[in-house]
Amino acid sequence: MSNSDDDKLLKRQEVEDRFGISRRFLEIAAVKGGGPAMVKFGRSVRYRCGDVRAWIEQHRRASTSDDRHAG
């Protein structure tokens, strides 16, 4: 995946298929926060590919004991 598709809008299932982030997590994060930024059109929720990549990058850690809070 190149950065050329950063503006592409993905459905939750597409985010799960491309990035391995479960639809259930995305649903919960949409209500409680803590997930990637989303775009909402009425009842439809989409995620910019670039926003998902950035969110993943913000959550990189060197070890499980690295508890720094990103974002």
Image (cartoon, rainbow, N blue to C red):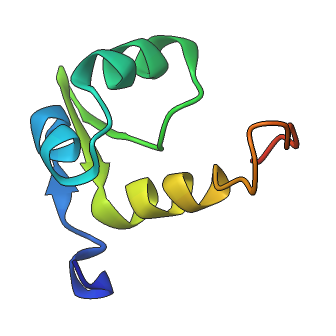
- At 17% from the left and 50% from the top, the residue drawn is 10
Q: Using the image, determine if residue 33 lies above or below residue 59.
A: above
Relative to residue 55, is residue 27 drawn left or right?
A: left
Tell me where residue 36 appears, x and y as whole percent: 47, 42
Quadrant of residue 57 within the rendered picture: bottom right
- At 64% from the left and 56% from the top, the residue drawn is 60
Relative to residue 27, is residue 58 drawn left or right?
A: right
Relative to residue 36, is residue 67 drawn left or right?
A: right
Relative to residue 56, is residue 43 drawn left or right?
A: left
Quadrant of residue 64 within the rendered picture: top right
- At 43% from the left and 62% from the top, the residue drawn is 53
Tell me where residue 11 appears, x and y as whole percent: 14, 40
Tell me where residue 30 appears, x and y as whole percent: 42, 21
Foreground residue among 35 and 41? 35
Foreground residue among 45 and 60? 60
- On-image quarter of the N terminus: bottom left
Counting the numbered discs, the total is 0
Q: Using the image, determine if residue 55 lies above or below residue 6.
A: above
Tell me where residue 62 appears, x and y as whole percent: 75, 57
- At 26% from the left and 85% from the top, the residue drawn is 2
